[in-house]
Image (cartoon, coloured by chain):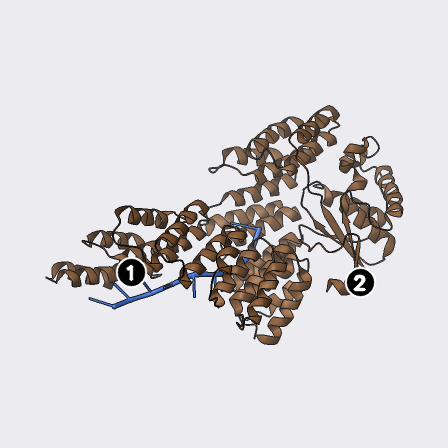
Amino acid sequence: MRVLRQLHAHILTRPLPLSSFAFALSKIVAFCALSPFGNINYARSVFAQIPHPNIFSWNSLIKGYSQIHTLSKEPIFLFKKLTETGYPVPNSFTLAFVLKACAIVTAFGEGLQVHSHVLKDGFGSSLFVQTSLVNFYGKCEEIGFARKVFEEMPVRNLVAWTAMISGHARVGAVDEAMELFREMQKAGIQPDAMTLVSVVSACAVAGALDIGCWLHAYIEKYFVLTDLELSTALVDMYAKCGCIERAKQVFVHMPVKDTTAWSSMIMGFAYHGLAQDAIDAFQQMLETEVTPDHVTFLAVLSACAHGGLVSRGRRFWSLMLEFGIEPSVEHYGCKVDLLCRSGLVEEAYRITTTMKIPPNAATWRSLLMGCKKKKLLNLGEIVARYLLELEPLNAENFIMISNLYSSLSQWEKMSELRKVMKEKCIKPVPGCSSIEVDGVVHEFVMGDQSHPEVKMLREFMEEMSMRVRDSGYRPSISDVLHKVVDEEKECALSEHSERFAIAYGLLKTRAPIVIRVVKNLRVCVDCHEVIKIISKLYEREIIVRDRVRFHKFIKGTCSCKDFW
DNA sequence: GTAGGGTTAG
């Protein structure tokens, strides 16, 4: 930049023909706008000194603004200005850049208008513009539009295929992503590491472990796994599919690990409930002098929250501030969750109502969970009001509020709420848990009775409830068990999917019981607490893998051979 | 006269 400023001064002070002057300045604009060492504001001021900036300078500025990390719509505003003045005329570069900008900020409406410019200005057949459109629609999760553009492309290269696959990956359409992956190879185009990152991440989103494993084998066969991003995608995929050991295996074999790789691993430990592993990994990361960023801190904070490690969590919070990271709404959410899970609900409420940024729904839900745990009806109702104001149609919220009422034996309020749900046609998505016994995966969907041994499980769970109650523990829900009417049974102890899975494990195996919980809903917020009690009563180790995504295979049972 | 589209962690 220092040299560039000198050159700029030189250009301004020498007599130069107008065309050379404009050309030189346009090169300065390009450098300042596009180089990682550049300065977009300086580019803008130089741009203003060009008498009639041509399309090249406009394009540099448009692209430059979408490269900075602020998620601004400035490139779109610039394009608008450009089309309003009518000079210079946009070219295929302009359209590709502005579509990229629309993709980054998922500006669907604006992107649609750019698409109409594409057609009007006759750039519909440009490969770059077409690919940009596919990418844009994919980023906006408008797969139908992406597919339509893609299908009309006469020539599709690797970039176009990858854009298409990553669009499907984003929405977790793993079968379609795999189909495209196969078609692409049939069309004679070989995938590269980027393509594989897309298909692997499709498996992560969908929880498709079987396909993920197959892809891992494919990668080992045809690639040398040295690609940082691809390894990271595999770590993320294994962690999200419930195979934390495999995630760790891929991770430790990575020769180079960047912030994203470490964050993926730590996050994986966090949602597997392995708080200590997450903290250890974080320490190692600092020792190897990789700088943690806002996502890394989110990972350790959520690990502390899940592990009930309040003082550790507070220390990480201070460390985050020392690193100069401005806490986002998600960070605040983690801190509130951390406090609530340890019963410090009042402090959490104070933070929520005094933080600089408006709290999100997840934060209110953490508070609501805390209120239920501490049996705080009044505060709980205040929190519920904020929550429903923010998300009036989310079934999860209603179920949580209903559970708060049921834990406090507020039956009238509870059935009132159920009535509102019915009126608004709000239907909850059932949670699901699974356990593997002798190589067979048994899946339990809440409210589903299709498991062949369901009758026996029912009886056993009655006994479990009795033992929990007789031992003097009073988990709020077990009181409810014998009182509720059929319609409200989903709140009862015996009806939670993870308890079906635990019961199955207690009955069928002597090994430690490892269950995987897919929480579409946080109906079982006291899950960990109840599990501790059952674990103690039956003297069995029970490990919960929390919030792990799984491919839906067959309801009931499925052989492990098919699974792999 | 200058430049271009696809990948990863919540």
Label 1 environment density (alpha carbons within 10 Å; few <14, some 14–19, many ≥20): many
Q: CA distance from mark 2 to mark 1?
A: 60 Å
Q: Position of residue A467 (x, y in %)?
A: 87, 41
Chain drawn brown, letter? A
Label 2 environment density (alpha carbons within 10 Å; few <14, some 14–19, many ≥20): few
Q: Chain of mark 2?
A: A
- The answer to whether A279 appears left or right of A124 in the picture is right
- The answer to whether A134 appears left or right of A348 in the picture is left
Question: From this viewpoint, is residue A494 visible?
Answer: yes
- The answer to whether A418 appears left or right of A204 in the picture is right
Residue receiving disc 1: A30
Q: Residue at x 56, y 66 (%)?
A: A196
Amino acid on which disc 1 is placed: Ala
* Depicted A265 relative to depicted A308: above or below: below
Q: Position of residue A194 (x, y in %)?
A: 51, 66
Residue receiving disc 2: A439
Q: Residue at x 80, y 62 (%)?
A: A439
The quadrant of the picture occupied by the C terminus of chain A is bottom right
Task: Say what secondary structure mark 1 lies in.
Answer: helix
Task: Establish whether labels 2 and 1 are both on one chain.
Answer: yes
